[in-house]
Image (cartoon, rainbow, N blue to C red):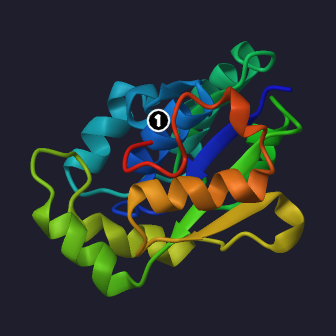
Amino acid sequence: MAVSVVVIGVCGSGKSTLGKGLARALRLNFVEGDDLHPQSNLEKMSSGQPLNDEDRFGFLSNVGFVLSEHKKAGVVVSCSALKKKYRNLLRLHDESVVFVLAELEESVLRERLMRRKGHFMSEKMLDSQLEIFERPTEDESVIFVDGHLGPDDQVRDILAKLAYDRSRCNADLNGPEI
């Protein structure tokens, strides 16, 4: 059975790194959510302006389209999905989607963002995302992982929680690379 996973969280939480590793382990395509933003969103965020619900609708529609298109085969997508209503909108495209959230303290997020170069999301944008972030509840089909773990350990944790058939994975889960 295929699984679709959306790696969620605020900027700096490691969505892309975790998503790529998880996709590799599950032998699924990875879709970078940042690439699904309309140009107007990228320009707005690059200028330090947070997105509003209206801005996010086009982006979420694009993410939803990816989920719909990969429903049979499965896919891993990175997407902030900061609010419950955003996650619910994505569920309309694939009701069995699993969300993954790597949790980190604000200070660690800020440090990561200050080190990140050449990305449209600056450290200044973190405040607006934290302000609207609605931490998922247990009834939302969310896997929580420790954001302090390395990516390989996070993937192992997620795979264990998914209770996924590891024989389909392309990697030795006991090895150094996933």
Task: Please say if 142 is above or below 71.
Answer: below
Screen quadrant of the N terminus? top right
Task: Give the side of residue 57 with respect to residue 47, left or right.
Answer: right
Task: Give the side of residue 173 with respect to residue 92, left or right.
Answer: left
The residue at which mark 1 appears reads as: 33
Residue 113, how many percent across, how many down?
22, 65
Q: Quadrant of residue 157?
A: bottom right
Element at label 1? helix
Total numbered circles: 1
Task: Please say if 37 is above or below 116.
Answer: above
Residue for point 58% across, 56% down = 156
Residue 106, how many percent across, how many down?
37, 83
Q: Say whether residue 158 is visible.
A: yes
Q: Which is more toward the observer, 96 or 160? A: 160
Residue for point 40% across, 44% down = 16
Residue 147, how many percent across, how many down?
46, 71
Q: Quadrant of residue 125?
A: bottom left
Residue 44, how many percent across, how many down?
30, 44
Residue for point 30% across, 56% down = 49
Amino acid carrying mark 1 in the image:
Gly
Q: Which is more toward the observer, 61 or 114? A: 114
Task: Give the side of residue 100 with respect to residue 13, left or right.
Answer: right
Q: Quadrant of residue 38?
A: top left
Residue for point 12% across, 64% down = 115
Task: Please say if 165 is above or below 108.
Answer: above
Q: Residues within 10 Å of mark 1 (few under 14, many from 20)?
A: many
